[in-house]
C-alpha cells in the first residue's frame, strides 16, 4: 500500500511538470526554469501578492488563481509543490523560502490588470515585463501626485555633501532647492525611458550645485514618504517631511521638557502664502527675519533651520512678488507644546 502511494506521488509530480511550457526531464531543474529568491522577479512577484495596503505592494495587477508553485533547494532539486489558491497563501509560501532556494510556477499564468482585463503570460520574461510596466506607471503617477505636496519638503539623505538640504516641488513643474543658505530655482518632470522611470531636475544656473542635480535621475519608491534617486555617479534618498497646521499664524511645535526643537521654516512657505491669499507660488519668494525692520529692508535673513529656545518665538517673514515687486511683511509665532505626541 505504501509503495503504491509513493508511486502515485511521483506520477502526480511528473504530471504537474508536464503542464509547464518547458517540461523538466527530471526532479532537478535548470537555471532558466526557476526564479531565485534573491532575484528581482521574485521580489516583484512577492509585492504583487501582498495586500494592496502593505508597504511596497504592487496593486496595478493581480494573479488569477489557482496555479502550482514548485520549491527547489540550493542545488535546484525539487523539494515540494503547492497548489496556490489565493494571495495570502502565496505570500506565506514565498516568505517561507530560504535565501538560496528557488521556485518555478506552472505556466502559462493568468493575470488581471488595472482595467479588469485578463492577460495570459507564457514566460517569466513576459511576467517580469508586465509587472515592470505597471509598476513604472504607478511610480509616474506617484511622483505627479506626491512630489508637489502642500506644506511638505523633501529632505536629502545619504549624501555627504548635500545632507540637510531639501527640495520643494510644485504642481506646475517648478522646483526650489535649498542648500547652504542659498535658494536655487528650476523645474522638474518625470518620464519613462528604456523601461525605467526618470526624474529630471533642472536648476537654472551654472553652479557646481546645479551641475550635480541637473540630471535624469532613475527613481525608485521606498515607501509613501521616501524614494531613491540614482545616476551613474551617485545614489541618495529624498525623505518627505510635512506640517499640516495652516489655520493660524500661531503654530504649536510638539516637544518635551528641557528640549529646544528645531523647525524647518520652509515647511510653512505654502501655509504662509495661503494665509495671505496667494494660491500660486510661481512668482513669489519668502525670506525669514528676526525682526520687522530686517524683513522690511530684506537684510539678515535667517537660516531655514530655526532652533526654538523660548516658549514662544516670533519670526517675521517677507513675501516678494518678482513680477510687480509687491511686498508683504508679517509675523508668525512658534509655540512649544508639551501635551502632544512626538
Image (cartoon, grey):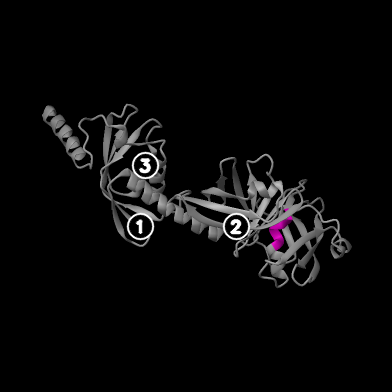
Picture mark count: 3
Question: Can residue 117 be seen in this snapshot?
Answer: yes
Magenta stretch mostly in which secondary structure?
helix
- Residue 236 lies in the magenta stretch: no
Magenta region: which residues? 264-269
In the image, which is nearer the foreground, mark 1 or mark 3?
1
Label 2, on which residue?
188
- Residue 211 horizontal side relative to residue 322, left or right: left
Question: Can residue 224 be seen in this snapshot?
Answer: no
- Residue 267 lies in the magenta stretch: yes
Contact (CB < 8 A) between labels 1 and 3? Answer: no
Q: CA distance from mark 1 to mark 3?
A: 23 Å
Label 1 neighbourhood size at 10 Å, few (<14), some (14-19), many (20+)?
Answer: some
In the image, which is nearer the foreground, mark 1 or mark 2?
2
Label 3, on which residue?
92
Q: Position of residue 85 (x, y in %)?
A: 28, 48
124, above or below 313, in the image? above
Q: Residue furthest front?
A: 206
Taking depth in this image into account, of 185 and 287 the one nearest to the observer is 185
N-term-proximal mark, 1 vs 2:
1
- Residue 20 horizontal side relative to residue 44, left or right: left
Label 1, on which residue?
113
Taking depth in this image into account, of 130 and 204 the one nearest to the observer is 204
Q: Position of residue 282 (x, y in %)?
A: 67, 66
Contact (CB < 8 A) between labels 1 and 2? Answer: no
User: Which image quarter: residue 328?
Assistant: bottom right
The residue at the point 20 percent across, 40 percent down is 16
Amino acid at each position: 500500500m505504501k509503495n503504491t502511494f509513493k508511486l502515485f506521488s511521483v506520477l502526480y509530480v511528473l504530471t504537474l511538470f508536464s503542464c509547464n511550457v518547458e517540461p523538466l526531464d527530471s526532479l532537478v531543474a535548470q537555471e532558466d526554469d526557476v526564479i531565485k529568491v534573491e532575484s528581482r522577479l521574485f521580489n516583484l512577484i512577492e509585492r504583487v501578492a501582498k495586500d494592496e495596503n502593505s508597504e511596497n505592494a504592487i496593486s496595478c495587477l493581480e494573479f488569477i488563481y489557482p496555479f502550482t508553485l514548485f520549491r527547489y533547494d540550493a542545488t535546484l532539486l525539487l523539494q515540494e509543490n503547492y497548489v496556490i489558491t489565493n494571495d495570502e497563501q502565496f505570500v506565506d509560501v514565498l516568505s517561507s523560502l530560504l535565501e538560496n532556494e528557488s521556485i518555478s510556477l506552472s505556466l502559462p499564468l493568468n493575470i488581471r490588470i488595472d482595467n479588469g482585463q485578463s492577460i495570459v503570460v507564457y514566460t517569466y520574461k513576459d511576467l517580469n515585463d508586465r509587472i515592470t510596466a505597471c509598476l513604472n506607471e504607478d511610480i509616474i503617477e506617484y511622483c505627479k501626485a506626491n512630489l508637489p505636496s502642500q506644506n511638505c519638503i523633501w529632505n536629502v539623505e545619504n549624501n555627504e555633501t548635500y545632507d540637510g538640504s531639501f527640495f520643494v516641488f510644485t504642481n506646475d513643474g517648478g522646483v526650489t532647492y535649498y542648500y547652504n543658505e542659498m535658494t536655487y530655482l528650476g523645474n522638474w518632470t518625470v518620464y519613462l525611458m528604456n523601461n525605467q522611470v526618470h526624474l529630471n531636475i533642472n536648476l537654472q544656473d551654472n553652479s557646481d550645485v546645479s551641475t550635480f542635480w541637473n540630471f535624469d535621475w532613475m527613481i525608485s519608491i521606498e515607501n509613501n514618504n521616501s524614494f531613491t534617486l540614482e545616476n551613474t555617479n551617485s545614489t541618495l534618498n529624498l525623505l518627505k517631511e510635512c506640517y499640516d497646521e495652516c489655520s493660524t499664524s500661531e503654530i504649536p511645535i510638539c516637544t518635551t521638557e528641557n528640549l529646544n526643537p528645531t523647525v524647518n521654516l520652509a515647511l510653512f512657505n505654502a501655509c504662509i502664502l495661503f494665509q495671505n491669499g496667494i494660491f500660486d507660488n510661481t512668482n513669489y519668494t519668502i525670506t525669514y527675519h528676526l525682526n520687522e525692520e530686517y524683513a522690511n529692508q530684506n537684510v539678515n535673513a535667517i537660516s531655514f533651520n530655526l532652533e526654538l529656545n523660548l516658549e514662544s518665538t516670533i519670526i517675521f517673514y517677507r513675501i516678494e512678488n518678482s513680477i510687480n515687486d509687491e511686498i508683504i511683511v508679517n509675523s508668525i509665532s512658534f509655540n512649544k507644546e508639551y501635551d502632544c505626541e512626538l
